[in-house]
Amino acid sequence: MQDFIFFLGRFHVLVLHLPIGILMLAIGLEIATRWPRFAALRPAVPATWLIGALCAFLTVTLGYMHASEPGFTGEAVNWHRWSGVLLAASALLVWAWQREFPKIYDRGWPLACLITGGLLVATGHFGGNLTHGPTYLTEFAPGPLRSGPGGRPPVTNVADADIFLDVVQPTLLTRCASCHNDDKRRGALSMATYKSLMEGGESGAVIDPGEKQRSDLYRRITLPADHKDFMPKNGRTPLTPDEVAVIGWWIEAGALPEGTVGKLNAPEDIRAKIAKVLGL
């Protein structure tokens, strides 16, 4: 029975697009039908709100099933869950409001649209963090929005780059954190911080400082892409050869939590690879 619940829960990521589109349509119709040109569409507005609400409740139900899988923990899961519940309830209340108290609703519809739209954005944001990781939105952002973990400024010189904070951690957050973060710990592993990374997961430590060949993390990112243990899974973008080489060198160098490339005396070939990873 548990596997069947997990099976149904996986449809959450497919069905969730329905309430998003339908409720956005409902808000658009609310605005458009205030003009005489689109007044003929007015009878379709209540039905659109109701269908959007029902789809939202279906999505929430599947979401609860999906979140029952091992690995979903943390505040982001709760924020996503409750924002989704509030979104579904809000859409249903809007439908009931315009049905039972149409005159009052004609004065308060902008507030209804604003609240529903805000909940749509919030729910999507928290869900996106769970699906793609917390750095997905700003991975290619311009200027200071693209700064590294902890608000670190962009690196302009390879020698001054901190090997973990500027190179290894951003790589892991980009490629692996969608499944291994504080809110979604697949295999009980989080790569959100150096401490959580070194603690490992349900199978033990994933990094053996000084021994890359004995480190499960390195083993998994260097396996053939069709191997069952290859990471990242599910067709996600794998690490580039340069990223793999840099992580391997970092592990061999002791898997330190900090230290600049210059002070660690990284060889020239590794410096060149680090420069490519940093986009220099």
Image (cartoon, grey):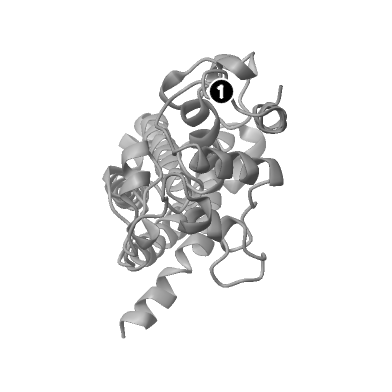
Screen quadrant of the C terminus: top right
Q: Where residue 262 sits in the image (x, y, percent)?
A: 57, 18
Viewed as shown, does residue 280 lie left or right of 107? right
Q: Amino acid at mark 1?
A: Val
Name the residue: 52% across, 18% down.
263
Residue 258 or residue 122, whichever sits in front: 258
Q: Where residue 195 sits in the image (x, y, percent)?
A: 31, 39
Residue 39 or residue 134, whichever sits in front: 134
Viewed as shown, does residue 276 lie left or right of 163? right
Up-down: is 214 above or below 86? below
Q: Where residue 77 sits in the image (x, y, percent)?
A: 32, 50
Viewed as shown, does residue 99 lie left or right of 179? left
Instruction: Name the quadrant containing residue 7.
Output: bottom left
Residue 30 in view of the camera: no
Which residue position holds label 1? 261
Name the residue: 31% across, 86% down.
1
Q: Residue furthest bottom?
A: 1
Residue 185 or residue 145, whichever sits in front: 185
